[in-house]
Image (cartoon, rainbow, N blue to C red):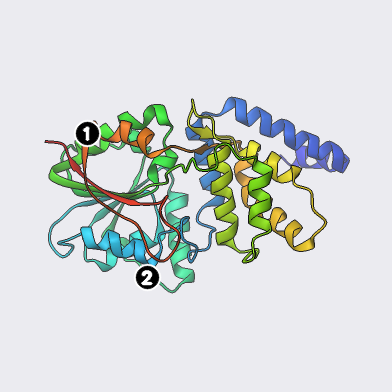
Amino acid sequence: MRLMYSILKGFSNKDLLYIRWLITEILANKLSHNEQSKLFWDNNGYARNLNTAVVNPSEDDLNIYKKYLIDGGGNKKVLLLGSTPLLRNLLNEAGFRNYVVADFSFTTIESSLRTLDKLNINVDIDNEIWLKSDWLEMPLEPESFDYIVGDMVFTQIEPYKQQLFAKKLASLLKNKGVFIVKMCLCNTNSSDKDPQQIIEEKLSAKNFENTARQRLELLYRLRNRLRDKESQITSVHAIVHELLQYKTTNNKRLSFIKSMLKMLSKRAEVNLPFITQTKDELEKNILRFFSLYASASASDYPSNDFPIYIYVLKK
């Protein structure tokens, strides 16, 4: 590796950028979606603003989870899909014992803890069981859990695998078990609008500021508009392309665009697409095994496209 480093140092900036592009192309063609996702999360972790709704559960989101996570002080068994920091803290505070945190990477689980440490939130890791596993292959006994909890977990599963995923989760729940999950629904209201117009509307709004929330709002609008309806995914490079096409001499707007490109850079490096599905598309995969018991949306951010669904096993 040192020899490679010495050789690369001799290349021009232009050549290095081209080599980087070649590596990205090779990775995109070589890696499966799962491998792309693992590479992204291992290197990105939870380096995100915990106070920004959507990418993390808001205070009201957490209240909804808590409402349906009853009997935390008893012997109820919980499976947490992923390492969402604030959900780990919620389970810990609610009194659940020996809940399972299932993630493909211990690096991600540990990164989640460091994120909580920054907020001076202490989670008792002796009360957690860490399971390093792909969610479709979790080596767990059938009918082991009273609750399965997740935050936008279906955005991590390719659409054609989601029925298998839902079947796996159903097999792990006990009779009368509950699956609580926040969803990310594709809003089709802008499906016929020019992507450049979508960007312009956001950047010319009276309340325009370069905030994490506003960057995410634009990202989701572009995800919805640029998705491939057949595959139900959105290419990260399609979003990057539209951002690069936007022309402006306004420094505030330029700063916003640069911030968005930086936000997308690590995902673009491994060419990890976004899973972008409508409510009907998701329900087609889930309702074969579950019935919708209730749904709710948080009141502390625009959350209509990010409802929390409470499912029960089909009888």
Tell whether 288 sits left or right of 254.
Answer: left
Q: Amino acid at mark 2?
A: Asn
Q: Is residue 214 above or below residue 226?
A: below
Q: Residue at x 51, y 46 (%)?
A: 41
User: Which x, y percent locates residue 314?
Assistant: 16, 36
Pick the front one: 173 or 142: 173
Q: Quadrant of residue 249?
A: bottom right
**Which secondary structure lies at badge 2?**
loop
Quarter of the image where the N terminus is located: top right
User: Which x, y percent locates residue 28?
Assistant: 61, 30
User: Which x, y percent locates residue 79?
Assistant: 26, 49
Q: Residue at x 62, y 66 (%)?
A: 207
Q: Amino acid at mark 1?
A: Phe
Residue under label 1: 289
Q: Is residue 61 above or below residue 134?
A: below
Q: Residue at x 42, y 46 (%)?
A: 184
Q: Are marks 2 and 1 in contact (CB under 8 Å)?
A: no
Q: Is residue 121 above or below residue 1?
A: below
Question: Can residue 149 be seen from the camera position used here?
Answer: no
Pick the front one: 247 or 90: 247
Quarter of the image where the C terminus is located: top left
Question: Can residue 17 be seen from the camera position used here?
Answer: yes
User: Which x, y percent locates residue 67?
Assistant: 23, 62
How far is mark 2 from mark 1, CA to CA?
36 Å
Residue under label 2: 122
Q: Quadrant of residue 125?
A: bottom left
Q: Residue at x 58, y 49 (%)?
A: 219
